[in-house]
Amino acid sequence: MAATTTGFLLIADITGYTQYLSESELEHAQGVLSSLLEVLLGETKAPLVLSRLAGDAVISYALGDAFPNGQTFLELVENTYVAFRRAIDKMVLNNTCKCNACANVGALDLKFFVHHGTFARQKLSAHEELVGNDVNLLFRLLKNRVTEVTGLRAYALYTDAAVQKLGLEGLTESMHAHSETYEHIGEVKIWVQDMAPVWAARKQADRKPLQDTIGRWTTDIALDAATVWSYLTEPSFLMKLLGTARLGYSDRKSGRVDLGTVIACYHGDHATMLTIVEWTPFERVLHDSVMHLPVSTANILCEFSLEPIEQGVRLGQAFGLPRGPWLGRTLARGFMGMISGRMQKDLDAFKALIEADHASREARPEPLPLPTTEARAQAARESLQSAS
């Protein structure tokens, strides 16, 4: 008998595929589905674990206390949606076939269903079957009135249990409050995020390359990118990285850390203000800071980047050349030269802190010797290839 555990359950379900299939040539429609499911498989990254494919949906989960910061889960979902929309746009742009399947691919979209609860995992061939009342609830939510009530076709549906566990209560003001009622379950309170603004914002995102620098430092961390990114948004851990005794956030959009958020870093009574000017989840964050020097000021860009490596990720920190009045630039370069030796120590201290914290979260039951996430993904890809 499989032991039960608690965690997050996620279904990514392609919107409109049933109608699309009924109006399209089967061979090409299957090829489109395979390509889109491949995108979803590629975005099912740790801490998420792939369970299985179910028709036009991908089912995954995350065990226990997998997310140090609940916003990271939200960003995993958003990244998946952005990758899906990019794939759709690429298919539309590169299409030369006149069949219905290829001509109508732009009508497809994606929705997500997220719940937190108790479930068991049963080994079936190269995948896992998730069972339990909370799993049943999530599948019941696939049949809902969200589009009818809100008009949304592309959305992420979070149960209130998931929102509470992720600590996302402050973000619900930008979501649609909704509820569904099911036989033998009763009323389920849910929150619905519109994914269209997510795609619009990412398409317009302005990348600001940091070309000329006055220093770069790196440290290798044996954790996945999403987990490291999650720690980068947690004040108690970010303080170690920034070498500050206290920090605070302001100008959050809908309660989240994002583009335009201001971070106040305190050294004694003096605060240095860092404004986030680029926020690319799991890849890069760029701060623009104002340095208040004895007789002048200067602006300086600070970059934190994540690069996948075989054993985890490489966290990098870099500073751009100071900007502003000549005196301010000169004093800033001198100041940065004085503290440059501390940068590597701060990076290494951050690494040690988050690896230790993550290890303390890792007491997860493993009742069955199950295939790895990559093995399951590969088995799913082989199944897709044989089907198409």
Image (cartoon, rainbow, N blue to C red):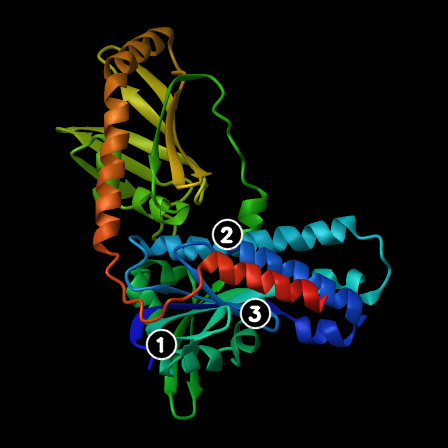
Q: Which residue is mark 3?
A: 57
Sequence-first disc among 2 and 3:
3
Q: Which residue is mark 2?
A: 79
Q: Nearer the viewer, residue 293 or 26?
A: 26
Q: Does residue 107 appear left or right of residue 39 in this picture? A: right
Question: Mark 1 is on which residue type?
Answer: Ala
Question: Mark 3 is on which residue type?
Answer: Ala
Residue at left offset 22%, top offset 41%: 353
Vertical placement of residue 278 versus 138, above or below: above
Mark 3 vs mark 1: in front: 1
Sequence-first disc among 3 and 1:
3
The secondary element bearing badge 2 is classed as: helix
Give how far across and how far down residue 304 sits, in percent.
38, 33
Question: Mark 2 is on which residue type?
Answer: Asn
Q: Is residue 108 shown to the viewer in this render?
A: no
Label placed on residue 206: none
Q: Does residue 43 appear left or right of residue 64 in this picture? A: right
Classify residue 66 by image quadrant.
Answer: bottom left
Residue at left offset 42%, top offset 59%: 48
Label placed on residue 120: 1
The secondary element bearing badge 3 is classed as: strand
Residue at the far left: name it.
268
Badge 3, how many Cα within 10 Å: few under 14, some, many 20+? some
Give how far across and how far down residue 244 sits, in percent.
20, 32
Q: Nearer the viewer, residue 60 or 240?
A: 60
